Structure formats: C-alpha cells, structure tokens
Image (tube, helix red, strand yellow):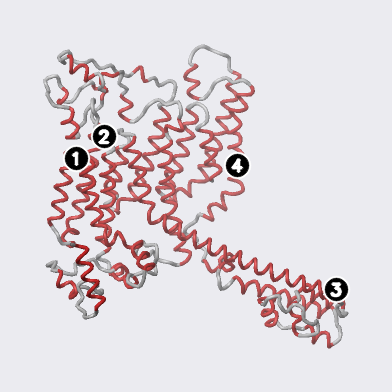
Amino acid sequence: MHVLGSMVMAMLLRGTIVMYKILYMMMFLSCVALYQVHYEWWRRILKYFWMSVVMYTMLVLIAVYTFQFRSDTAGNKDSFRDLGLEKFSVSELFTRIFIPTSFLLVCILHLHYFHDRFLQLTDLQAVVAKEESTIYRLVHPDGSLADLTMLSASSGDASLSKSKDEEQGPQSVRADCGVSKEQTLVVVADDASSAGTKPGSLSDARQSSTDESHLFSVGTEPGQSTEQSSDLKNKWHLVIDRLTVLFLKFLEYFHKLQLFIWWLLEIHIIKIVSCYIVLVAIREVSLLNYVFLASWAFALPYSQYRPLASSVCSVWTCVIIVCKMLYQLTSIKPSSFSKNCTMPAAYSTKQEEEMQDSVLYKGPVDPANWVGLQKNEELLDYIRHNLLILALLAFEVTIYRHQQYFRLRNKLSPPAARIIFHDITRQHLDIGIICFIKYFINYFFYKFGLETCLLLVVNVIGQRMDFYAMLHAFALITVMYRRRRKAIAEIWPKYCCFLACMITFQYFVCIGIPPAACKDYPWRFPSSKTDSNVVKWLYVPDFLSRPNPSFLIYDFMLLLCASMQRQVFDDENKAAVRIMAGDNVEICRDLDASSFSVHNPVPDFIHCRTEEWMTDKKVHSVYLIQQ
C-alpha cells in the first residue's frame, strides 16, 4: 500500500497538471478520505477501487499512445493539452508512459498476490489472541530461555531414541550415555566451565545431540581429538544460545519501546493535528481555510465533536487539493476575470498617496485569491500543507485503530488516566525526587492547569494590546471573581465557548469582504477621518492595513489549554482519577494560614509546631528569605 501510494504521488506531481492526473488524484483522495471516515466501508470497496484504478490506467495509456497518430491541427490544442493528450517524441513518450505502466503492473501484482492477505491483517473483527503468537512466546522473558532449552532437550531425546532403535550396543554404553530429559535441560542452561570432564561420567550430557548420535552410530569410545572437538562444539552452542537469549531480550525491550511510543502518540496526537491545521489556516488566510479553524475551535473544548471535525477536515482537504489542481490548468486564465478598481476622485492628495498601497488599487484583483486559489508553477510546494494535513489526519485515525486492535488482542481496557507512568500515584509524591518528577510529568496540568491558563490569558493581553485584549481582560476578571475552584469549574465551559466564538469571529474579520466587489470599508471613505492606528487597535477588516492574523496564534494556544483544563475539571469528578492523582479541593476555605495544618492531609513543613532546634531554624530562615 505504501509503494502504491508513493507511485501515485510521483505520477501526479511530476510534470504539468492535466485532467487525467486530476482524476487520478480524485480517486486517490476519495480512498484516503473513506479510510478516515468509515474503516469497514473502506475495506469493502478497496478491491473494487484498485480494479477501477487498473482499468482507468489502461484507458489513459491507450489514449496517450493512440493520440500520437493524430494529425496536427491548429484548433483545440489547449483543450487537448489540458486533458493530457499531446504529441511527443519517442523519448518523451517513453518517459510519459513509463511511470503509469509501472504503476499498472504494481497494481495488478498487488491485487493478485497481496490484497487478500492485506485484508486479513487489517481486519479488526478477527483478532488473534496474543498467547497464540509464537513471536510473543519467544520474546516473553519467562518463555524465551525455556523454549531454547526445551528445544535442545527434545532434539537430544529424539536422537537418543533413534540411536537406541537402530543400534543395539552393549548395555554399559547405553547406561553411560542414556541421559534423561531433566539432565539435558540443566546442562544447556549451564556454563562451559565444566565441559572438559571425562566422557564416561554423568557430565557427558553436556555434549550436543549431534555428538550423542555420532557416539551411538559408531559404537566405539571417543579419542582425544573427538573429546576436544565436542568440547569446542559445546562452547559454541552455549555462545549461540546466549546470543539468542540476548537478541530476544532486545526484541522484548524494542517491543516495550513501541508500545510506549504508540501510547504517547495516542495521548498527544490530537494536539499535534489541531495545532498544525490551525497554523496552516492562519498562515494562508482564505475562505476555504475558514472551515479548518471553525471546526477545531469548537472541537477542542467539546471532545465529542473531535471525530466529526477530523472527518470534515479530511473531506474538505480533499476538496481543496482538487480545486487547487483544477485552477492550475492552462485554460483557466485569471486575467480574463480579474478586475481593476478605480480610486474615488474625492480623495485628497495625501489620502491618494496613502491608498496606493491598498489591495483594491495596487493592481488587478483576482477574486479567486480571496477564496484561496492562485496560480503557482510549483504544484508540490503549493499543496504541500494540504497533503500534510491529510497525512496527519490519516495518521491520527491509524493510531486510534492500532490501539483498539492492540487492546482487543490483549484483552485490555483503556487506562482511566492519560498518563506516562502508570505505577505513580499521589502516595508516591513525597517519597523521593524521582517519584516527585514522575508524578508531575503525569499530573502537572492536573494540578496547575488552571494557573497555566490564567498566565496564558495575561500573555495574550500583553501580546495583543488591542480591543480583543480588553475583552480577554474582562473575561479574566469574570473568571477570577468566582474565586473558588468548584465555582470556576461551573463557568469554565462558557469561557471555552467564548474563546472559540471569539477566535472564529476574528478569523472572519481577517478574511473580510471580497475585494473584487471594489467596495471599500466605511472607515476608508474620503469623508472618514479614522486614523490607521485606530483601525489596527479595533482589529477590523481593512484593505490598506490588514489585521495581523498572527495574533490568533496566541488565542488558539489559550483555547487549547482551556480545553485541556475543561477535561481536567471533568476528571476531578471521577473517583479513579482522584485515587491516582489526588483531589484538587481547597484545604482551607477562609485561606487562613494558621489553620493549614488542620485541613492539610500531608505533612506541613512550614507551620508545624515543634520544639526541635533544626525545625525552628528552618522556619525562621524561610521567613527571613520572604522578608
């Protein structure tokens, strides 16, 4: 699948954009979008999808090749070129059809040999139990060494029974060499220090099964050279067994690292995806990207809408990519529908000089730019961010399905808390520095998320210093007025909704009205005396001094942290989370420092009353530092 996807991208993004490549991209994007939206439907139509790709590739190759026999005519050349049909030289024709032909062969091979097996491996309904896997049994720390020893023991017993049936030697030889299975099991796990004992003793079991079979088949006592060679072979067998165990240990640790990375990605993938999508939308302000920002602005605080936001963004990204590719066709000429706006004659000389830099009067206005489309010679660079958005969304849903498959296979349930160290709880906090660090890696935002959000509000106010910063200040005052944590938790969903509405409205302000209408804003009329600094402070749309969309980055980071804090408020009502992380209830309602030790469930090292000299010195030192 990865090879096929890479070949599709190499075929589509190479050379000029033509219609048959756009149809390829539409088929590929529809497959990726269906994979993210509905997994079972995607598996059902996957075979028919590749069959349709094979037939379409055949039609494209036939059309391109047969068009070479067409006589040259002056008319409709641009139309045929947009379709991808034009005459080439022999070398150019070979390079044009080489990648589609290779892609056709790979698709046929995939359908014939690998497709059925791929469907079996990706079936989440038919999950094989972990205990039935031989690889897991070998990698398991309690099973790897035992499996090797049992393998050696079984091979020794098999060779011993075979030699007894074939060769009827003296009774003494059978008594000397007939070692039991338990002796062989002990010998394989032993070291090579006692490999040089006499062959007639019980330590002859250290010889391998090959040497034993050789002894029985010959029926004679080994010489000095045979003893040395058998000792050397025994040493090499022990080395190989030890290396095998170490390799299996390495596989075990590598498997644990994989599990840790998958779990880490499951925790943070939603933050990575939302941040990248919103940053792309802020970097390229347009009407098409408004869907991205509006979707994630409301999906972050309301987690039940996150799968819907991912599906909407996946489908919308596919639509944007197809639209951008269609706009690159040579038959679409922006000069044919661009407009030149005329500056009003009522402007004074100073106003005319200032308005020369306005988007309306700087040059021809392409209405497609306001939508989010523009001509670009480098198509890959133009749609790179959209392709990365699609890849991130596909990676997100892959992570969730991988974790679902893993838990079904191992008969596990999702953890109660999304933490890194599952063996660290509130009881471990005061044990030592290591436990202290682990606890706060797990629960730092659980304990100090509210304070972090309040600091981010202050940062937004200091960075912006405009009208919307004043609105943030009023919202901060409203939240702080509630004082108690329980009261703040009750109003916090409304605060998150306020942040989401404000960032979506500000993005709409950055988009503004279409400039192709050649209508300016009232604060830029010739009779208006509004200063440009006032326009910037109010953060209103303007063609001369456009609102700075970078301010929305600060608002989005605040929204992200506020959404995480809302999840913390929900977790505080869960008994399982409170047992592991502790509660966030105030220890003293009236905030009287003298009564802290009465309500504090942990030792108070500041206000404790003791007669010990060192404790008194410590308290005095703390107060001196504060003064």
Q: Nearer the viewer, residue 2 or 27?
A: 2
**Answer yes or no: do the residues labelled 1 and 3 have beta carbons within 8 Å?**
no
Q: CA distance from mark 1 to mark 3?
A: 92 Å
- Disc 4 secondary structure class: helix
Q: Nearer the viewer, mark 3 or mark 4?
A: 3
Q: Kindly identify the residue that appears in the image at 87 percent across and 79 percent down.
A: 219
Please count the marks in the image.
Answer: 4
- Disc 3 secondary structure class: helix
Labels 2 and 4: the sequence-earlier one = 4
Please name the residue that numbered disc 4 is placed on: 108
Q: Residue 212 location in percent, x, y?
A: 79, 76
Labels 1 and 2: the sequence-earlier one = 1
Q: Is residue 220 left or right of residue 536?
A: right
Q: CA distance from mark 1 to mark 2?
A: 13 Å
Please name the residue that numbered disc 1 is placed on: 465
Q: Is residue 330 above or below residue 372?
A: above
Please name the residue that numbered disc 2 is placed on: 548
Q: CA distance from mark 3 to mark 2?
A: 88 Å
- Disc 1 secondary structure class: loop
Say which amino acid is labelled 1: Met
Labels 3 and 2: the sequence-earlier one = 3
